[in-house]
Amino acid sequence: MKLKRALTVQNVQDFKTIKIKFKGRFYDVFGHPQNKGRWIVLGNSGSGKSSFMMQLAKEFAREEKVIYNFLEEDLDDDNVKDRLTLFQMHDVAKNFSMVSEPIDVFTERLKMRNSAQVVIIDSAMYFFRGFTFDKYLEFTRQFPKKLFVFTAHGKGTQPRTEFETSIYYDATQKVFVNGFLATNKGRKYGPNNKFFIVWQKGFEDLQGKNKEFETD
């Protein structure tokens, strides 16, 4: 078997990367993320995770085509429609689409020409139900040039299940949402902050109830 030549430092540094130009608070917290990789957004029920995800989807959709696969909520649920209105998703309607599809159908969609660059899956547990972590690896590695964002359930500050924990450690970007505050857990940080307030009033109300609330 003929082996490929190992790369030098200069070879690696010469690779061209494509960045998504985040603005405002998203830039402060996440900088300009690469347009490929694997994000995980972890949060407990009622944490503000769904609202953060919609805002994040909108930020991605300013520059890239985004598809959001809803598996925990029906697309005709009032909660979904309310978030679409609240975060003015019509502003990015040209780049933003939604489906509710199982893994086999969704995989075929992603294979289509001009399919979305940013793929949001809510949630990982529902999407990979009945499968192992090997299936997750097979699925994501089929599309090495896409950016995946998975939501996951939390147990405290950690993923709830062993499967979600495996995804957490594989992820190239980690975000934890709690009390309407999203915290950048790495690997890449923005220049000015690592906290993103999802909903100002909700966050302030919780601060008032818990004077010892810590954000780090």
Image: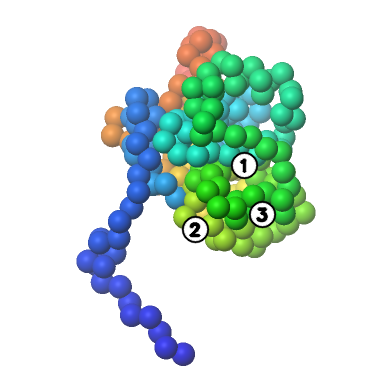
Report if residue 104 is visible in the image. Answer: yes
The spot of residue 98 in percent (x, y) is 63, 35
Q: Nearer the viewer, residue 8 or 74?
A: 74
Mark drawn on residue 144: 2
Say which residue appears at 35% left-offset and 44% top-offset: 19
Q: Quadrant of residue 124?
A: top right
Against 167, residue 70 (above or below) is above
Q: Which of the image's four quarters has the C terminus?
A: top left
Q: Residue at x 64, y 50 (%)?
A: 109
Q: Secondary structure at mark 3?
A: helix
Nearest the camera: 72 or 111?
Answer: 111
| Dot label at residue 108 | 3
Alpha carbon separation for disc pair 3 and 1: 15 Å
Mark in the foreground, 3 or 1: 3
Mark 1 is surrounded, within 10 Å at the Cα level, by few (under 14), some (14 to 19) or many (20 or more) other residues, namely many
Q: Quadrant of residue 122?
A: top right
CB within 8 Å, label 2 to label 1: no
- Which SS class for mark 1? strand
- Residue 158 appears in view: no
Label 2: how many residues lie within 10 Å, few (<14), some (14-19) or many (20+)? few
Q: Which badge, 2 or 1, is on the more N-terminal residue? A: 1
Disc with the residue nearer the chain's start (3 vs 1):
3
Q: Which residue is mark 1?
A: 121
Q: Residue furthest right?
A: 130
Q: Position of residue 65 (x, y in %)?
A: 50, 39
Residue farthest bottom in this picture: 1
Query: What number is the disc on residue 183?
Result: none
